[in-house]
Image (cartoon, rainbow, N blue to C red):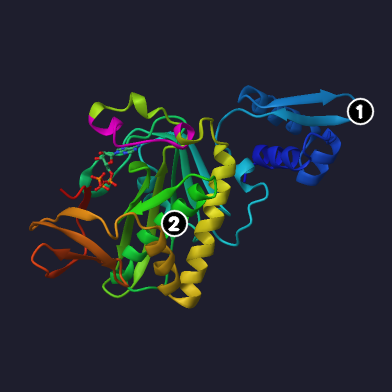
Amino acid sequence: MTIKDKILGKLISNKGTPVSGEKLASELSVSRAAVWKHIKTLRGEGYMIDSTTNRGYSLTGAPDLLAPAQIKAGLNTCIIGKEIHYFKEIESTNTKAREIAHSAEEGTVVIAETQSGGKGRIGRKWLSPEGGIWLSIILKPKIQPLHAARLTLLAGLAAAKTIQGMSIEAKIKWPNDVLVKGKKVCGILTEMEAELDRIDYCVVGIGINANVDTELFPEEIRDLSTSLEHELGHAVNRNWFVRRLLEEFEKEYLTFQKDGFSSILEEWRNMSGTIGEYVKITTQAKTIYGEAVGVDDDGTLVIETNDGKLEKIVAGTCEHLRRT
Ligand code: ATP
């Protein structure tokens, strides 16, 4: 964490009560002039900081920006989000996370206000305008590479539960989307680097349309997407949301490491919007129509086709169709 972030963290944790420049300087082992310089920079970034002679600095307002110091203030996790790399603009948080993954601690997060080249599955694009939450988490799980798809389900569950915690009815669409009233509010992209029998690292990208105006999306996506702001009727405090999401993610991740995947899967099934739906599945090899009847241990979707056969789908695109 930079000195500037540490100063901001201290102002946040003092909740508007002034902290003297002298105290900040001695606690952070810098000069009072350096404290003043960072306060000036923070003001330049939109933070409203009052300064009163003899009493010190107090934070009276913050810009609507993601800020690692604000995310970390009160963050109740052991590994996830201990280190946060923040960018105003980036090509892709997943790409950045992959660049730094080898030397990064597990749980390191890369987060950005906008992505110019946000990625979806199989080369698709993920729109990432201002107001959204675009983040990637670096993980180094001790699991077999063939079980990596479980992390996508786990991330979808964490995102859906966090959204549900705001009294928005969220459902998970297999394998990697969170929907509200049938519209996409969140997408997940898991990428990994692995040997045959061992994962070097996984990067779990989570994109959330938080305070995004999806009316501005291109026509073909507009009607299929929504945002938290739209569903709630007011903007979301994104730093608060990220904190809740990271806490939820860590809870699921630690349960997965300690007790295995079955309890995660059970919760996933309960929040699934896909099981019970009549779906169209497109894989590289074929297109299948049928009812989604279950998801097995590795996240494989089980389809009962029209002629009563069970088909297992490891990867593919899933469309929910209305029965005719
Ligand atoms: P789908 O199931 O919606 O066909 P997918 O889950 O297979 O898509 P993803 O990689 O998850 O594919 O998402 C990429 C797709 O999501 C894009 O092709 C586009 O249609 C849509 N999309 C892109 N950006 C957003 C966004 N910010 N919000 C909602 N949907 C988006």
Q: Is residue 209 left or right of residue 175?
A: right
Please report contact status of discs 1 and 2: CB closer than 8 Å, yes or no.
no
Badge 1 marks a residue whose secondary structure is: loop
Q: Is residue 1 above or below residue 219?
A: below
Judged from the image, the quadrant occupied by ligand 1 is top left
- Relative to 137, say whether 221 is above or below: above
Query: Which residue lies under the disc numbered 2?
Result: 138
- Residue 3 screen position, x and y as percent: 67, 40
Question: Residue 21 is drawn in which quadrant?
Answer: top right
- On the question of residue 23 being in view, the answer is yes
Mark 1 → mark 2, Cα distance in angstroms = 44 Å
Is residue 285 found inside the magenta-colored segment of the image?
A: no
Mark 2 and ligand 1: say if the CB distance to the nearest ligand atom is below 8 Å. no
Q: Which residue is mark 1?
A: 54
Tell me the residue at 45%/47% (across/down): 169
Secondary structure at badge 2 equals strand
Q: Which residues are magenta?
A: 220-230
Q: Quick check: 262 above or below 250?
A: below
In the image, taking residue 185 as reference, residue 76 lies left or right, namely: right
User: What is the x, y in percent for residue 22?
Assistant: 85, 36
Label 1 or label 2, whichever comes before in sequence order? 1
229 falls in the magenta region: yes
Question: Who's the residue at 31% across and 63% down the image?
Answer: 149
Residue 102 visible in this rendered orientation of the protein: no
The three-letter amino acid code for the residue at tag 2 is Ile
Give the total of numbered labels: 2
